[in-house]
Image (spheres, coloured by chain):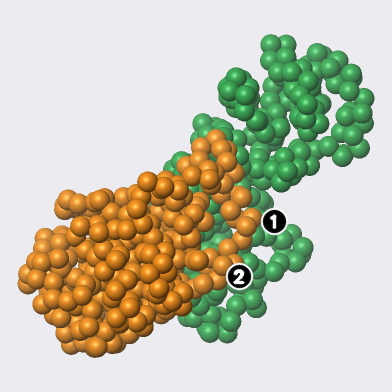
Chain colours: A orange, B green
Amino acid sequence: MLFIDPHVHMTSRTTDDYEAMRKAGIVAMIEPAFWMGQPRTEAGTFKDYYSHLIGFERFRASQFGIKHYCTIGLNSKEANNEPLAEEVMELLPLFVLKEGVVGVGEIGYDDQTPAEDKYYRLQLDLAKEVNLPVQIHTPHRDKRKGTLRSMEVALEHGLDPAMVIVDHNNEETVKDVLDRGFWAAFTIYPHTKMGNERMTEIVRQYGHERIMINSAADWGISDPLAVPKTAELMLERGISEESVRMVTYQNALAAFGQSGQMQESDWLAASPIDQSLKFSGNSILRGGQTPRVETGENENDSRIIR
Amino acid sequence: MPTAPISEYLLRILLPQIPAPGVTWLQNQLNNLKAEKEFYLAFSVASRFTGKKKLNLTEADLLEAETLRPGFNPASWTADQVARTLLVLAIPHETPEAYVATLNRVFSTADLNELATLYASLPLLPYPEHHVKRAAEGVRTTMTQVFDAIALHNPYPHDYLPQEAWNQLVVKSVFNVRPLYQIYGLDNRRNEALAQIAIDYAHERWAAGRTLTPELWRLVGPFLSPENIKNIEKLLQSPEEIQHQAAALALSESNLPEARELLAKQPNLTAAIQAGNITWQTIGESAYHA
Ligand SMILES: [Zn+2]
């Protein structure tokens, strides 16, 4: 099976992860712009971060046969530094129209402060102006209220719910999101967000329309194989192959494909010559080593993520 | 260097090969590019209007490119690449410094394809002597696609890079297994320092029991000496025929009496070289595509 992980922060991950992801069937992934674990203090570091996403990280992924896309935005935590946020807002137009940028994201609320609200709204307007999907980060604390507010504000700014992916859902938020016509994304992330047994039951209950799963793997204890592992678990527990395909591949493609910057042919028609060029000449596998393709089994990992 | 003939040429090869809305869009952009911000946006969105297909070019098109700018070879250029190059040629500016400042900003926000496009465009841009640092920076990249754009089929390094940066480019090409025969003007800028680096590198690879591209000896031939010729002798003992070809070709490029003697012991290779059947081009092609 082929998979798309529509939310994974590869800048924080190693080449072993890329190798394991490709081996597990992940052909494309989306890296939302987020925060790095500690607040940045200069606008220039944002510029370099964004250009890293569309430059080196895209290159790094390509060496493992994975198509790398990203969403560009000012995350909610760092929106709280207003002077900095102002400067970052001026950078965004330089990046949102780049090739392979499939949305504005991840944006939304964290502590739900007035500053977060202000830059969330400004970025919704930007997304509407350039006709890109929006990838919304919903808060960990006060989640249900924050999720509802995210959607209300998006509607207030005239966004089509079909262009908005609401992320980090759980059992308490999924119905509201689906009822309003938004895409509902679920993050399979140990301990803090969703586990994949719970996820299986959500798909059993709500079906596969407008639902997608991701790993949101980053610098925390997280799992870049969450999507393929969850697919396997779902199949094992009687979810249909069609539904598994929808929530681990097709819906992400449909939602973010609305950007015009992501199509199946990007990976299905990728030239094998490109691959050999990259592998013989690349600089990560230094000095012309051949790539290791027979590792990354992760036999020790349980497929279950709690 | 006047850039108008280049722009006219690029438009002529591009416009018949892109969709009609792309033609209108591009002409609009080129005629109305007044502010820096418009340039940045147009540069990013260009591929949405032009598509990304490789252009179909005739022999005559390629000859014309070579005449306009020696070494300019758009054989593998894509529609978006040509459109972006046209936009870069049209950056609104008053002084060379202002031009370079805008160029630096677009470099610093460029994605992978855009970076490759920008580096490949360097030989066509105005104020060529202002882009030396940029070209040297390109040589430092770790991204193969970007490195190839500056190193391969690009006359800018040959024409403008100082020797140290040029040598870096060649050595990095060897190290990263890039095809040396695609480096424009390589023979013309061979030098003794480069030959010595190449020999040292060969020793390193041999010591580690690793393979070595036969193209490496292209850098060594004219600088063979009584001290280093033993490397060629060793090469002639290699089990690979292509290494023998490289050894013989390197010998044929040396005036050293020892080299003449050694070559004389290889009548078949000598004949093949004289018949033009063994060249650095043929060696490069078979080494790289083997
Ligand atoms: Zn995230």
Disc 1 and disc 2 on one polypeptide chain: yes
- Taking the view exactly as shown, the residue that stands out farthest to the left is A114
Question: Is residue B37 shown to the viewer in this render?
Answer: no
Secondary structure found at label 2 = loop
Q: Is mark 1 within 8 Å of ligand 1?
A: no
- The image position of residue A182, as x and y in percent, is 28, 83
Q: Residue at x 72, y 11 (%)?
A: B226
The subunit letter for the residue under badge 1 reads B
* Image quadrant occupied by the N terminus of chain B: bottom right
Secondary structure found at label 1 = helix
Q: In the image, is A116 to the left or to the right of B110?
A: left
How many numbered marks have been drawn onto this rendered protein structure?
A: 2
Q: Nearer the viewer, residue B103 or A114?
A: A114
Indicate which label's residue lies in the foreground, 1 or 2. 2
Kind of residue indicated by mark 2: Lys
Q: Residue at x 53, y 80 (%)?
A: B22
Vertical arrangement, residue B159 with respect to residue B86, above or below: above
Per the model, the C-alpha gap separating discs 1 and 2 is 22 Å
- The image position of residue A147, as x and y in percent, is 17, 76
The image quarter in which residue A260 lies: bottom left
Q: Residue at x 65, y 68 (%)?
A: B55
Vertical arrangement, residue B190 with respect to residue A81, above or below: above
Kind of residue indicated by mark 1: Glu
Which residue is the site of mark 2? B53
Q: In the image, is B20 to the left or to the right of A204?
A: right
Q: Nearer the viewer, residue B229 or A172?
A: A172
Which residue is the site of mark 1? B66
Q: Residue at x 20, y 84 (%)?
A: A176
